Image: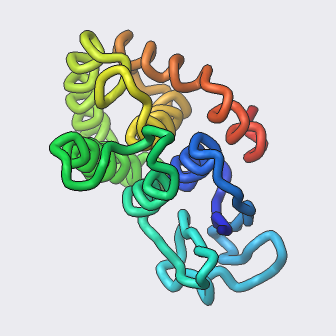
Amino acid sequence: MKLFYTPGACSQSPHIALREAGLAFDLVKVDLRAKKTEGGDDFAAINPKGYVPALLLDNGQLLTEGPAIVQYIADQKPESGLAPKNGTLERYRLQEWLNFISTELHKQFSPLFNPAAPDAWKDTVKGNIARRFAHLAEHFKTHQFLLGDTFTVADGYLFVVLNWAKMMKLDIPAAVAEFHARVAARPKVIEALKAEGLA
Protein backbone atom coordinates (compact mmCIF):
# COMPACT_ATOMS: atom_id res chain seq x y z
CA MET A 1 0.00 0.00 0.00
CA LYS A 2 1.01 3.59 -0.57
CA LEU A 3 -0.26 6.51 1.54
CA PHE A 4 -0.23 9.96 -0.04
CA TYR A 5 0.11 12.46 2.78
CA THR A 6 0.98 16.02 3.74
CA PRO A 7 2.72 16.52 7.11
CA GLY A 8 0.25 17.46 9.85
CA ALA A 9 -2.79 17.25 7.57
CA CYS A 10 -5.72 14.89 8.11
CA SER A 11 -3.70 12.22 6.27
CA GLN A 12 -1.86 11.81 9.57
CA SER A 13 -4.89 9.87 10.84
CA PRO A 14 -4.51 6.93 8.39
CA HIS A 15 -0.74 7.21 8.82
CA ILE A 16 -1.18 6.54 12.55
CA ALA A 17 -3.67 3.75 11.80
CA LEU A 18 -1.23 2.02 9.42
CA ARG A 19 1.50 2.05 12.05
CA GLU A 20 -0.84 0.94 14.85
CA ALA A 21 -2.03 -1.94 12.66
CA GLY A 22 1.54 -2.96 11.83
CA LEU A 23 0.86 -2.98 8.08
CA ALA A 24 3.53 -2.56 5.40
CA PHE A 25 3.16 0.70 3.47
CA ASP A 26 5.09 3.41 1.66
CA LEU A 27 4.69 7.11 2.35
CA VAL A 28 4.50 9.59 -0.53
CA LYS A 29 4.66 13.26 0.47
CA VAL A 30 2.38 15.63 -1.43
CA ASP A 31 2.71 19.38 -1.90
CA LEU A 32 -0.96 20.34 -1.93
CA ARG A 33 -0.37 23.85 -3.29
CA ALA A 34 1.67 22.63 -6.24
CA LYS A 35 -0.42 19.41 -6.56
CA LYS A 36 2.82 17.45 -6.94
CA THR A 37 4.24 14.45 -5.13
CA GLU A 38 7.77 14.61 -3.75
CA GLY A 39 8.84 12.65 -6.84
CA GLY A 40 7.35 15.29 -9.15
CA ASP A 41 4.23 13.36 -10.18
CA ASP A 42 0.98 15.21 -10.86
CA PHE A 43 -1.09 14.48 -7.77
CA ALA A 44 -4.32 15.52 -9.48
CA ALA A 45 -3.77 12.64 -11.90
CA ILE A 46 -3.46 10.26 -8.93
CA ASN A 47 -6.37 11.67 -6.94
CA PRO A 48 -8.67 13.92 -9.00
CA LYS A 49 -10.12 15.29 -5.73
CA GLY A 50 -6.76 16.97 -5.27
CA TYR A 51 -6.36 16.43 -1.54
CA VAL A 52 -4.99 13.95 0.96
CA PRO A 53 -5.34 11.33 2.29
CA ALA A 54 -5.31 8.87 -0.57
CA LEU A 55 -4.39 5.23 -0.13
CA LEU A 56 -3.22 3.28 -3.17
CA LEU A 57 -4.07 -0.35 -2.56
CA ASP A 58 -1.95 -3.28 -3.70
CA ASN A 59 -4.58 -4.12 -6.35
CA GLY A 60 -4.17 -0.66 -7.92
CA GLN A 61 -7.39 0.84 -6.60
CA LEU A 62 -7.31 4.23 -4.88
CA LEU A 63 -9.26 4.75 -1.65
CA THR A 64 -9.94 8.30 -0.47
CA GLU A 65 -11.66 10.03 2.48
CA GLY A 66 -10.09 9.56 5.89
CA PRO A 67 -12.95 7.83 7.75
CA ALA A 68 -13.27 5.21 4.97
CA ILE A 69 -9.50 4.70 4.77
CA VAL A 70 -9.00 4.17 8.51
CA GLN A 71 -11.81 1.62 8.66
CA TYR A 72 -10.29 -0.22 5.71
CA ILE A 73 -6.92 -0.25 7.49
CA ALA A 74 -8.46 -1.52 10.73
CA ASP A 75 -10.27 -4.30 8.88
CA GLN A 76 -7.01 -5.54 7.37
CA LYS A 77 -5.85 -6.37 10.91
CA PRO A 78 -8.99 -7.06 12.98
CA GLU A 79 -6.88 -8.46 15.81
CA SER A 80 -5.40 -4.97 16.29
CA GLY A 81 -8.65 -3.81 17.90
CA LEU A 82 -8.51 -0.56 15.92
CA ALA A 83 -12.18 -0.97 14.98
CA PRO A 84 -14.98 -3.11 16.39
CA LYS A 85 -16.30 -5.94 14.23
CA ASN A 86 -18.53 -4.95 11.30
CA GLY A 87 -22.24 -5.24 12.04
CA THR A 88 -21.92 -4.67 15.78
CA LEU A 89 -23.41 -1.70 17.59
CA GLU A 90 -19.89 -0.76 18.67
CA ARG A 91 -18.87 -0.46 15.00
CA TYR A 92 -21.72 1.98 14.48
CA ARG A 93 -20.51 3.88 17.55
CA LEU A 94 -17.09 4.11 15.87
CA GLN A 95 -18.73 5.45 12.72
CA GLU A 96 -20.74 7.87 14.85
CA TRP A 97 -17.51 9.29 16.29
CA LEU A 98 -15.75 9.37 12.91
CA ASN A 99 -18.67 11.35 11.47
CA PHE A 100 -18.71 13.71 14.45
CA ILE A 101 -14.99 14.41 14.07
CA SER A 102 -15.24 14.79 10.30
CA THR A 103 -18.27 17.07 10.14
CA GLU A 104 -18.43 18.83 13.49
CA LEU A 105 -14.71 19.38 14.09
CA HIS A 106 -12.49 18.77 11.05
CA LYS A 107 -14.47 20.92 8.60
CA GLN A 108 -14.89 23.69 11.17
CA PHE A 109 -11.14 24.34 10.88
CA SER A 110 -11.21 25.24 7.16
CA PRO A 111 -11.88 28.97 7.66
CA LEU A 112 -9.24 29.13 10.40
CA PHE A 113 -6.62 28.02 7.87
CA ASN A 114 -7.94 30.45 5.23
CA PRO A 115 -6.29 33.88 5.45
CA ALA A 116 -9.11 35.37 3.33
CA ALA A 117 -11.84 34.25 5.74
CA PRO A 118 -13.43 37.19 7.60
CA ASP A 119 -12.66 37.47 11.32
CA ALA A 120 -16.37 37.36 12.18
CA TRP A 121 -16.66 33.97 10.48
CA LYS A 122 -13.57 32.72 12.28
CA ASP A 123 -15.04 33.85 15.62
CA THR A 124 -18.26 31.96 14.88
CA VAL A 125 -16.29 28.84 13.99
CA LYS A 126 -14.23 29.08 17.19
CA GLY A 127 -17.47 29.18 19.17
CA ASN A 128 -18.73 26.08 17.35
CA ILE A 129 -15.46 24.25 18.09
CA ALA A 130 -15.61 25.26 21.76
CA ARG A 131 -19.10 23.73 22.06
CA ARG A 132 -17.91 20.49 20.44
CA PHE A 133 -14.91 20.42 22.79
CA ALA A 134 -17.27 20.81 25.76
CA HIS A 135 -19.14 17.71 24.58
CA LEU A 136 -15.86 15.80 24.30
CA ALA A 137 -14.77 16.99 27.75
CA GLU A 138 -17.89 15.46 29.29
CA HIS A 139 -17.20 12.20 27.49
CA PHE A 140 -13.56 12.04 28.58
CA LYS A 141 -14.48 12.54 32.23
CA THR A 142 -15.54 8.88 32.24
CA HIS A 143 -13.69 7.38 29.23
CA GLN A 144 -10.01 7.01 28.36
CA PHE A 145 -10.76 6.89 24.64
CA LEU A 146 -13.76 7.52 22.40
CA LEU A 147 -15.01 3.93 22.64
CA GLY A 148 -14.08 3.40 26.27
CA ASP A 149 -10.74 1.95 27.29
CA THR A 150 -9.57 0.84 23.83
CA PHE A 151 -7.72 3.00 21.32
CA THR A 152 -9.39 2.97 17.88
CA VAL A 153 -8.92 4.73 14.56
CA ALA A 154 -11.36 7.42 15.73
CA ASP A 155 -8.93 8.38 18.50
CA GLY A 156 -6.13 8.82 15.98
CA TYR A 157 -8.35 11.11 13.91
CA LEU A 158 -9.37 13.21 16.91
CA PHE A 159 -5.71 13.49 17.93
CA VAL A 160 -4.87 15.07 14.56
CA VAL A 161 -7.69 17.61 14.83
CA LEU A 162 -6.60 18.50 18.37
CA ASN A 163 -3.10 19.17 17.03
CA TRP A 164 -4.65 21.85 14.82
CA ALA A 165 -6.45 23.32 17.82
CA LYS A 166 -3.14 23.62 19.66
CA MET A 167 -1.57 25.24 16.60
CA MET A 168 -4.44 27.76 16.47
CA LYS A 169 -4.09 28.37 20.23
CA LEU A 170 -7.70 27.40 20.91
CA ASP A 171 -8.76 26.61 24.46
CA ILE A 172 -8.84 22.85 25.03
CA PRO A 173 -10.65 21.59 28.14
CA ALA A 174 -8.48 19.68 30.61
CA ALA A 175 -10.14 16.30 30.03
CA VAL A 176 -9.63 16.67 26.26
CA ALA A 177 -6.01 17.77 26.74
CA GLU A 178 -5.42 14.68 28.89
CA PHE A 179 -6.82 12.49 26.10
CA HIS A 180 -4.51 14.22 23.61
CA ALA A 181 -1.51 13.56 25.86
CA ARG A 182 -2.45 9.86 26.17
CA VAL A 183 -2.54 9.47 22.41
CA ALA A 184 0.63 11.55 21.90
CA ALA A 185 2.53 9.15 24.17
CA ARG A 186 1.70 6.07 22.06
CA PRO A 187 4.86 4.68 20.41
CA LYS A 188 3.25 4.31 16.96
CA VAL A 189 1.91 7.87 17.11
CA ILE A 190 5.41 9.11 17.94
CA GLU A 191 6.73 7.09 14.98
CA ALA A 192 4.21 8.72 12.65
CA LEU A 193 5.04 12.22 13.87
CA LYS A 194 8.76 11.57 13.41
CA ALA A 195 8.21 10.18 9.92
CA GLU A 196 6.34 13.36 8.98
CA GLY A 197 9.11 15.53 10.41
CA LEU A 198 6.88 16.83 13.21
CA ALA A 199 8.64 15.40 16.28
Q: Above or below — where is 34 with respect to 145?
A: below
Q: Position of residue 174 (x, y in %)?
A: 38, 10
For the point 42% across and 26% down, which residue is it? 170
User: From where the camera sits, is residue 120 visible?
Assistant: no
Q: Total number of numbered labels?
A: 0
Between 74 and 31, the one nearer to me in the picture: 74
For the point 37% across and 48% down, which residue is it? 106
Image quarter where the C terminus lies is top right
Indicate the quadrant where residue 127 lies. top left
For the point 45% across and 48% down, which residue is it? 78
Q: Check the image and name the residue furthest to the left.
A: 89
Q: Position of residue 46 (x, y in %)?
A: 61, 84
Please indicate whether residue 18 sits to the left or right of residue 180 in the image. right
Please indicate whether residue 3 sits to the left or right of residue 145 in the image. right
Image quarter where the N terminus lies is bottom right
Q: Where is residue 125 in the image (x, y as percent from the top left)?
A: 28, 42
Q: Above or below — where is 152 with respect to 96?
A: above
User: From where the camera sits, is residue 74 visible?
Assistant: yes
Please indicate whether residue 165 sits to the left or right of residue 131 in the image. right
Indicate the quadrant where residue 126 lies. top left
Between 140 and 171, the one nearer to me in the picture: 140
Q: Above or below — where is 184 with respect to 100?
A: above
Q: Where is residue 16 in the image (x, y as percent from the top left)?
A: 58, 44
Q: Check the image and name the residue furthest to the bottom.
A: 45
Q: Check the image and name the residue furthest to the right.
A: 39
Indicate the quadrant where residue 90 lies. top left
Between 61 and 78, the one nearer to me in the picture: 78
Identify the image's colour scheme: rainbow, by chain, secondary structure or one colour: rainbow
Please indicate whether residue 180 sits to the left or right of residue 121 in the image. right
For the point 30% across and 23% down, which residue is it? 148
